[in-house]
Amino acid sequence: MDKMDKIKNELSNYNSILEKLNLEESLSYVIDNIEGKKVFSTSFGIEDQLLTHFINLINKEVSVFTLDTGRQFNETYEVFDKTQNKYKNIDLKVYYPNEDQIQEYVKEEGINGFYNSVESRKKCCFVRKVVPLKRALEGADVWITGLRAEQSANRETMQFLEWDEDNKLIKFNPLLKYTLEEVEEVVNKYNIPINSLYKKGYLSIGCAPCTRAIEKGEDFRAGRWWWENGKKECGLHIHVDKNN
């Protein structure tokens, strides 16, 4: 058995255990049983806010970070501030895009060039999100995310623990099986601060120019890059469907 097969076998065993645990138990289990540096990325969406609450309660060594693209909603900064004030056990680090890369993008594509083509939009996401993410994940062994299978067809085949080949680390999706209603229930129970845009129909909140409220009957991510068709991801979460 080679190293990769061994990792996948171990993750399969861990996933069998995680199926039986609640959220707080699963977070503690992974933190205690998988060696290495753990990091949690938050964009201050409702799922990330729920995880922030429990990571703060567990109060163990998890590095928390966010990516500030420079094009966020003001409401996102407002919930950022509330989160810092409420959860004192967390030292939240911010990663920003490279200034030279932003200047080059704007010079070549225009300030709102992401509307012009899928390629231009992905280039913007790469500069503002993917490059800073690579810096944030340096030295990390486990990346905790707020991804849920229900969010999009791209994510339905995810596992609690997966090997992220692109970033060479383990990705942990503790909210994988949660429905939106279940997330909202826990958030309301513990009075967890959320983005004020959420109750206005912004169920998935990214950069301000690239996000709109969804309409009744639309899926969770319909408001992201709404002018595009097909599968829409920014490149932060590249998932390979294991059934294909």
Image (cartoon, rainbow, N blue to C red):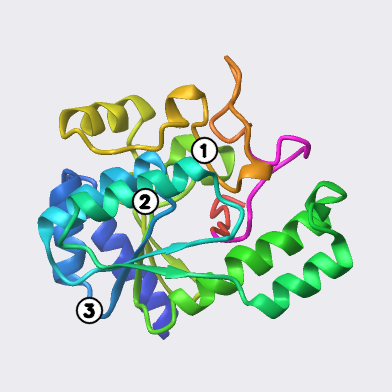
- Front tag of 1 and 3: 1
User: Relative to 200, is 123 above or below?
Assistant: below
Q: Is residue 38 magenta?
A: no
Q: Is residue 86 left or right of residue 136?
A: left
Residue type at mark 2: give it.
Phe
- Which residue lies at the image location 41% right of the left edge and 76% below the top edge? 5
Position in image of residue 96 (x %, y %): 53, 70
Label whose residue precedes the other's in the sequence (3 or 2): 3
Observer able to see residue 168: no
Residue type at mark 3: give it.
Glu
Question: Looking at the rendered structure, which numbered label has been put on residue 35?
Answer: 3
Distance from label 2 to label 1 (Cα)? 16 Å
Residue wearing tag 2? 80
Disc 1 packing (10 Å; few <14; some 14–19; many ≥20): many
Distance from label 3 to label 2 (Cα)? 29 Å
Stretch of the chain drawn in magenta:
224-236
Position in image of residue 99 (x %, y %): 65, 76
Question: Looking at the rendered structure, which numbered label has been put on residue 204?
Answer: 1
Q: Nearer the viewer, residue 225 or 172?
A: 225
User: Relative to 101, is 111 above or below?
Assistant: above
